[in-house]
Image (cartoon, rainbow, N blue to C red):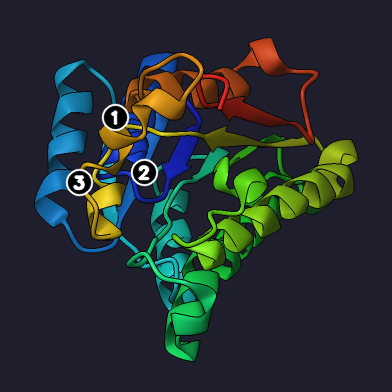
Amino acid sequence: MNSVAIVTGGSRGIGRATALAAAKLGYKVVVGYASNEAAADDVVAAIEASNGKAIAVKCDVGVEADILHLFKEADGFGRLGALVNNAGVVDRTARVDEMSAERLARMMTVNVVGSILCAREAVKRMSRKHGGAGGVIVNLSSVAATLGSPGLYVDYAASKGAIDTFTVGLAREVSAEGIRVNAIRPGLIDTDIHASGGEPGRAQRLAHSVPMQRVGTAEEVANAVVWLMSDEASYVTGTIFDVSGGR
């Protein structure tokens, strides 16, 4: 394999673990990052230290121009074979009656519109209809989509519900064009996204609510993502996998 995998939000957490795992699978990796250049460069260095190939590209998926730049850089790196729509945001915990229009716009722009625009650019390159050789798209959803996250971030949950629907619809739209589209719904995972929501210890605090009685790791999610990217999942599309310890 010598094709390129784009991993948005690839500088930390699940994105970082996915980028490293994709490189081990044989992909050349484009590490998209919104602001933490040092962390993205560290991922690239780790991949290159294992004889893989990677580049870091600054990209806020809430900005279309950044997305176009990301894909242009990827084009110069090789043939696009996979997209992992991992970049996303969460906000401070709040009830719906406390949420501003600005918060909601940011949530949906980054988590939903950004993922759809990235998928649009991937389809243009992968689809046999456009002269491509096929490929794989994996979207990162969340079990919040099924739980609703009341009193925490219903807006985030709603954005991930949109990702679930988008995954199924796009999969059916492009399956005959050589593109598989699936999603992963992580549960309580030990990453710093919880700190972004103002509660860094949230995952550990709620570990007792998971049937397996523990939180998951970024690597456990990444393992599921790269399996969907691999030829072993060649007959899997339009599927949403929970990686949640049974939650």
In what element is the residue under mark 1? Answer: loop
Residue 209 sits above or below residue 31 on the image: above
Q: What residue is shown at x 59% (from left), y 64% (from top)?
A: 112
167 displayed left or right of 197: right
Of mark 2 and mark 1, the one earlier in the sequence is: 2
Q: Position of residue 56 (x, y in %)?
A: 25, 49
Q: Distance from label 3 to label 2 (Cα)? A: 10 Å
x 57%, y 59%: residue: 115
Inter-mark Cα distance, 2 to 1: 9 Å
* Left or right side of 45 for 225: right
Q: Check disc 1 and give the amino acid type.
A: Lys
Q: Residue furthest top?
A: 232
Q: In terms of secondary structure, where does tag 3 sit?
A: helix
* Label ID, residue 40: 3
Residue under label 1, please give it.
Answer: 53
Identify the mark nearer the N-term, 3 or 1: 3
Instruction: Give the camera-side residue of 123 and 170.
Output: 170
Callout in the foreground (2, 1): 2
Q: Which residue is mark 2?
A: 30
